[in-house]
Image (cartoon, rainbow, N blue to C red):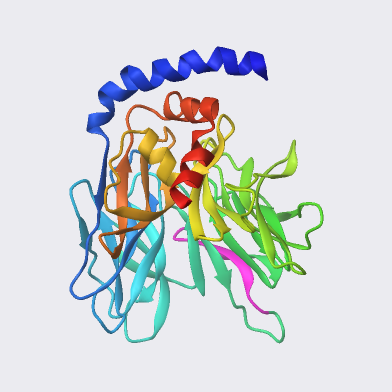
């Protein structure tokens, strides 16, 4: 331990004093602002190169809301729904998305949206994930029949609907080409292999817990993240799962935090996003193998982003190089989505500095005092 500190301390000083600091002036954060008399906006998913963000925004004081897209300069409402709706997921190149909203007078529906074709209804009851190639949407379906309940399902333009889960199951995300889906079956996190006849792999729980849920999966389908919960204590823990390691606990931001959850893993599985609950409420976190868990705000600050007037930042999407993030925060009293850019790549600079000095937790604790 002493040797590690001796080796890394000079490196930390070097990183904070040279290329990192010199290029930090080009880092930025851009809020989506307010639409009409709406009171919120959010970024839900970001494209692979960080140029497109899909989200949702309130549009009037009565609570109506609409899908929005940010495309490099500003966020704009996406027309085509006849009622409330919002985006839940975006494909890799930003040309296709899924979500929920009323497309016509037949009632609320789930949809596939494409940049060329607009909104198209799907038969899914809920649609929360889309494959990176944009061909497959995953969620939940309610087949006819007594006592079946909602079941994990997928849908594609080419293949139609595929109901692969048992009763009381749900799929939240898919890998790059839709051959792997993750979610829950009953009360346990599950992975489904859809490359042939569907097969299910229960992921279990962390020790002492009795329920779990998988929220996101890497592009190759080998890394899954989510949460494991102890119903008796009402506390949950963020997990990372692989076939080799099984389910592992990601830890917490602070010793007194009571619950954590992981909601997103980057396509290359290098970054995990989620939240940690403590005395001050929910704090967004980012986790890597190098630095462990640190707050999103600490990550952005280390990447040169000026967070003046920003607070309560939670991230829901990040590019594979860790350079662009989207999510939601509060800016000058308004809850709004954002796109942030950190410079240079935090995987090699900012997070190394955070890991060496323990700044992620230290900065957060100091701000909370």
Residue positioned 26% across, 24% down in the render:
23
Q: Is residue 150 magenta?
A: yes
Q: Is residue 17 shown above or below 176?
A: above
Could you say where residue 125 lies in the image, as x and y percent from the top left? 51, 75
Could you say where residue 315 lies in the image, as x and y percent from the top left? 43, 51
Q: Is residue 140 magenta?
A: no
Could you say where residue 262 lies in the image, as x and y percent from the top left? 57, 52
Q: Residue furthest right?
A: 208
Q: Does 40 sit left or right of 322 as displayed?
A: left
For the residue pair 316 and 314, the one nearer the viewer reads as: 314
Q: Which residues are magenta?
A: 149-162
For the residue pair 122 and 63, the one nearer the viewer reads as: 63
- Would you say the magenta stretch is mainly helix, strand or loop? strand
Q: Is residue 39 shown above or below 329?
A: below
Q: Number of numbered discs present? A: 0
Q: Is residue 15 shown above or below 332?
A: above
Q: Does 118 sit left or right of 110 as displayed?
A: left
Instruction: Using the rendered view, name the quadrant where residue 57 is placed.
Output: bottom left
Instruction: Using the rendered view, name the quadrant where residue 77 is placed.
Output: bottom left
Could you say where residue 231 lies in the image, as x and y percent from the top left? 74, 68
Residue positioned 68% across, 20% down in the render:
1
- Can residue 173 be seen here? yes
For the residue pair 160 and 143, the one nearer the viewer reads as: 143
Q: Does 335 sit left or right of 134 as displayed?
A: left
- Can residue 176 be seen here? no
Residue positioned 30% across, 61% down in the render:
336
Residue positioned 23% across, 79% down in the render:
60
Instruction: Using the rendered view, name the quadrant where residue 263 is placed.
Output: bottom right
For the residue pair 213 and 299, the one nearer the viewer reads as: 299
Q: Does 367 sit left or right of 30 as displayed?
A: right
């Amino acid at each position: 331990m002493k040797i590690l500190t001796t080796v890394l301390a000079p490196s930390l000083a070097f990183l904070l004093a040279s290329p990192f600091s010199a290029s930090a002036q080009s880092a930025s954060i851009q809020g989506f602002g307010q639409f009409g008399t709406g009171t919120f906006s959010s970024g839900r998913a970001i494209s692979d190169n960080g140029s497109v963000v899909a989200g949702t925004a309130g549009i009037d004081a009565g609570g109506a809301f609409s899908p929005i897209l940010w495309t490099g300069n500003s966020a704009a409402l996406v027309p085509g729904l006849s009622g409330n709706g919002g985006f839940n997921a975006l494909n890799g190149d930003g040309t296709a998305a899924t979500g929920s909203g009323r497309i016509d007078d037949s009632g609320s529906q789930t949809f596939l949206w494409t940049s060329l074709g607009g909104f198209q209804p799907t038969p899914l009851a809920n649609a929360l994930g889309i494959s990176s190639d944009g061909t497959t949407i995953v969620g939940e379906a309610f087949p006819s029949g007594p006592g079946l309940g909602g079941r994990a399902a997928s849908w594609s333009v080419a293949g139609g609907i595929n109901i692969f889960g048992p009763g009381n199951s749900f799929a939240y995300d898919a890998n790059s080409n839709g051959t792997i889906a993750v979610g829950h079956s009953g009360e346990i996190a599950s992975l489904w292999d859809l490359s042939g006849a569907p097969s299910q792999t229960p992921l279990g729980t962390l020790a002492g817990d009795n329920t779990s849920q998988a929220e996101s999966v890497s592009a190759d389908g080998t890394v899954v993240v989510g949460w494991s919960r102890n119903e008796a204590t009402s506390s949950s823990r963020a997990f990372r799962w692989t076939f080799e390691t099984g389910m592992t606990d990601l830890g917490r931001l602070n010793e007194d935090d009571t619950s954590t959850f992981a909601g997103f893993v980057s396509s290359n599985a290098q970054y995990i996003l989620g939240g940690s609950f403590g005395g001050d409420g929910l704090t967004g976190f980012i986790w890597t193998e190098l630095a462990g868990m640190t707050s999103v705000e600490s990550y952005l600050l280390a990447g040169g982003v000026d967070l003046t007037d920003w607070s309560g930042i939670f991230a829901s999407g990040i590019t594979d190089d860790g350079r662009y993030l989207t999510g939601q925060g509060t800016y000058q009293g308004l809850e709004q989505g954002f796109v942030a850019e950190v410079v240079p790549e935090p995987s090699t600079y900012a997070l190394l500095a955070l890991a060496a000095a323990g700044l992620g937790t230290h900065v957060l604790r100091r701000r909370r005092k």
